[in-house]
């Protein structure tokens, strides 16, 4: 049995999505393994931990501050590294957006012996997508590069490689911030630069994931990224 950790970030109003990702993880995520969900939050989740204490999924908390948009998403790699010791207690570590649901089995067969796992963006399957073309940013990928575009919503790998990636991306983000530079799509731009230079050994493609509005078209997608505009809008959750 493998020990697998799933990181989620749920500050302020995002906490309302936590039950959904816990319940769908319990139903579909690596069912032959021991699962820990590490919730990076500024909210009290003791009642949620109590509610799920009999589940196969263990719930841990890492206290963070809620910061002004886009820092809470941009600094996800900082949060991971603040829990480095917990992450390294596990064989594999992943991140998923808390406003998501697992809809189908995610099995141990996808776990790589080496390398990371990346998920092609569900709305940008073809072509280079929208990487950062600003050469002032450490997330810069030049025009004409043979890249594919990965979403920031689900990725992972062995815990050692997850930490290695987080350290490199955190360093790049700090470099940008020290010079007043913000990558185009924040953490996702930096993740794409990392995968451009360190290609994932497993690429989740062919509509492995889908945005909520795509589910009728791709009913077999195993991850659904929920549409915040149906639940109050992006600004509502970022406040």
Image: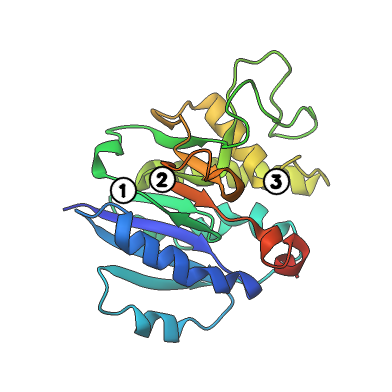
Callout 1 secondary element:
loop
Q: Nearer the viewer, residue 106 or 190?
A: 106
- Residue 129: image quadrant is top right
User: Decide: marks 1, 3 in contact (CB < 8 A)?
Assistant: no
Where residue 54 appears, as percent x and y from the top left, is 25, 78
**Distance between the Cα atoms at labels 3 and 2?**
25 Å
Please tell me which residue is depicted at 54% across the width and 55% down the height of the picture: 97
Displayed quadrant of residue 236: bottom right
Label 3: how many Cα within 10 Å (few below 14, some 14–19, many 20+): some
Evaluate if marks 2 and 1 touch, with contact meaning CB atoms under 8 Å apart: yes
Q: Distance between the residues labelled 2 and 1?
A: 7 Å
Estimate the x, y position of residue 233 in percent, counting from the top left.
74, 63
Does residue 153 appear left or right of residue 104 in this picture?
right
Q: Name the residue under label 1.
A: 105
Q: Which of 219 and 119 is in front in this view?
A: 219
Judged from this view, the residue extending furthest toward the right is 180
Residue at the left extreme of this rendering:
1
> In 3D space, how far apart are the residues under numbered discs 1 and 3 (Cα atoms)?
30 Å
Q: Is residue 197 above or below residue 66?
A: above
Mark 1 residue crowding within 10 angstroms, few (<14) / some (14–19) / many (20+)? some
Q: Which disc number belongs to residue 176?
A: none
Mark 1 or mark 3: which comes first in sequence?
Answer: 1
Q: What element carries label 3?
A: loop
| Number of the label disc, if any, that sits on residue 186 | 3
Foreground pick, 208 / 56: 208
Q: In which quarter of the image is the C terminus?
A: bottom right
Of the numbered discs 3 and 2, the one sitting upstream in the chain is 3
Residue at mark 2:
222
Asked which secondary structure carries label 2, the reply is loop
Residue 183, placed above or below residue 114: below
Q: Compared with residue 13, is residue 46 higher up or lower down, i.e. above or below?
A: below
């Amino acid at each position: 049995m493998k020990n697998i950790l799933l990181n989620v970030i749920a500050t302020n109003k995002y906490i309302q999505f936590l039950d959904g990702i816990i319940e769908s993880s319990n139903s579909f995520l690596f069912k032959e393994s021991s699962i820990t969900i590490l919730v990076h939050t500024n909210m009290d989740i003791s009642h949620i931990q109590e509610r799920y204490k009999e589940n196969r999924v263990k719930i841990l908390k890492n206290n963070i501050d809620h910061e002004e948009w886009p820092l809470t998403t941009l600094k996800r790699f900082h949060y991971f590294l603040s829990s480095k010791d917990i992450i390294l207690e596990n064989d594999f570590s992943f991140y998923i957006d808390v406003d998501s649901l697992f809809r189908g089995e995610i099995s141990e067969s996808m776990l790589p012996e080496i390398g990371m796992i990346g998920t092609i963006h569900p709305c940008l399957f073809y072509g280079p997508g929208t990487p950062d073309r600003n050469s002032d940013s450490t997330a810069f990928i030049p025009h004409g590069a043979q890249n594919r575009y990965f979403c920031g919503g689900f990725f992972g790998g062995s815990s050692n490689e997850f930490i290695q990636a987080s350290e490199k991306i955190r360093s790049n983000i700090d470099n940008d911030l020290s010079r007043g530079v913000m990558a185009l799509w924040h953490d996702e731009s930096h993740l794409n630069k990392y995968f451009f230079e360190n290609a994932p050994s497993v690429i989740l493609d062919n509509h492995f994931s889908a945005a909520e509005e795509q589910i009728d078209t791709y009913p077999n997608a195993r991850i659904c990224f929920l549409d915040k505009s149906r639940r109050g809008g992006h600004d509502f959750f970022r406040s």
